[in-house]
Amino acid sequence: MAAVGCVLGLAATACSGGGGTGGGSQGAGSQPSAGATKAAPGSAGLSIMPANGSRNVSPTLNAAGTAWHSTNPTLDVSQRYTVTARAAGTSNGTVTRTSTFRTLTPSQTFTTQILEGSGQTYGVGMPVILYFSQHITNKAAVERALQVQSSKPVVGSWYWDDNCGMAPTCAYFRPQSYWPTHTQVSFTGHLDGVEGAPGVYGYHTLTQSFTIGDSLIVVASTATHHMDLYRNGTLIDRWPISTGRPGDNTPNGTYLTIEKANPVDMKGPGYNIEVPWSVRFTWSGDYLHDAYWSVGEQGFTNVSHGCVNMPPADAQIYYNMEVPGDPVTITGSPRPGTFDNGWTMWFLPWSRYVNGSALGEAVQAGPGGSTFVSRSSVPASSAAAPLGAPNPGNWAAS
């Protein structure tokens, strides 16, 4: 049981109570607050709500200007708090009131996981990816509790996805254009006490820090049968490839690399093979990989089952440089990409992406943390494809 003392210096007319005891927010079987701890007759109009001895108080504080609130959006659940308020400058001198209360213990909770690993390095396209254990309906309240700190200033947005297939609800933070290289990113989710759905509360604070590494970008053309590899803004290689044959066409779109292994056991109609130097970019099984068996077709025709076939030496070079979140753009295919088949956040142009925010606002992030800003205040990005951002409509069929 944690005890927290809060000492408030308040003007004599500043307090009128009302600090988050609405009956609709209380858990089943909870008891309402006994009222406010009030000032004596003739003294300053100072009161504290929740009143001394209250239990099962909703941890969500109201947003009215008459109520003090902590620096976090909510109070923690299942905690005991002591608040001491002093009003000075009254006819009776200084008036002091104290209230000790306990926040509710919710009958239902949600947990949140972040995909990024502590201290790991990711590509310039990598979004912050959150998985929620329960379906989140009060997305605006949860979004307000999410903070992003970046060593280099970026403008981005949250995007909510109830059909991600990885959790009941997912949320992604993505910059307007690709991250600056070598950016340090820290995330904090002040989720303890946030009501994510009716009667379902977060009960922990989630933190994580990771790094954006070099820019490594692939543009693979199914029409020319070649792929370009850019590193930190410079074209460093152009390699012959073979992509999906007719009927198994590799889908268009700007994807992000997800994972890699050497080898990967690939199975399908008529084949079961250990494939070296394999880097995945869709959930349905599209990879960039060594295809020693199709070297003669690479650069000339498409013969694969949907993957990007590469010469062995080139596949190994790419494999050794790649980290999760490196952009891979497939062009020239008659087959469109499918949203959520992989990390497809860059399928959406900025105007559509920010529409996915529950608050309808952008996020300005920097070394001091993040703030929500009006989307209309965000200037158009000057980043150009393919190095700064992908082309709009990159997932559409050619």
Image (cartoon, grey):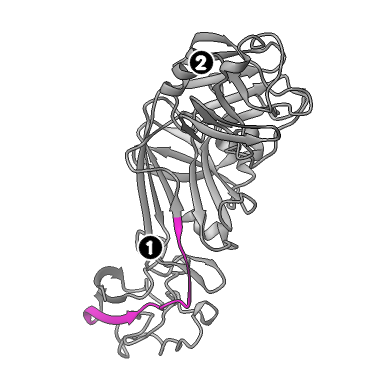
* Quadrant, the N terminus: bottom left
Q: Residue at x 67, y 21 (%)?
A: 243
For the residues bearing labels 1 and 2, Cβ distance under 8 angstroms: no
- Residue 68 position (above or below residue 84): above
Q: Residue placed farthest to the left in the image?
A: 93
Callout 2 amino acid: Pro
Residue 107 lies within the magenta run: yes
- The circle on residue 204 is 1
- Residue 113 position (above or below residue 353): below
Q: Residues within 10 Å of mark 1 (few under 14, many from 20)?
A: some
Q: Position of residue 307 (x, y in %)?
A: 63, 26
Image quadrant of residue 197?
bottom right
Q: Residue at x 41, y 82 (%)?
A: 56
Name the front one of labels 1 and 2: 2
- Residue 117 position (above or below residue 251): below
Q: Position of residue 111 (x, y in %)?
A: 45, 62
- The circle on residue 99 is none
Callout 1 amino acid: His
Q: Is residue 215 toward the left or the right of residue 39 in the image?
A: right
Image quadrant of residue 291?
top right
Q: Is residue 27 toward the left or the right of residue 337 in the image?
A: left
Between residue 255 and residue 205, name the one nearer to us: 255
Main SS, magenta residues: strand
Q: Is residue 1 toward the left or the right of residue 210 in the image?
A: left
Residue 333 visible to an observer of this rendering:
yes
Q: Position of residue 22 (x, y in %)?
A: 50, 79
Q: Residue at x 68, y 28 (%)?
A: 306
Q: Which residue is mark 2?
A: 312
Q: Is residue 209 toward the left or the right of residue 341 in the image?
A: left
Q: Residue at x 53, y 19 (%)?
A: 387
The range drawn in magenta is 92-112
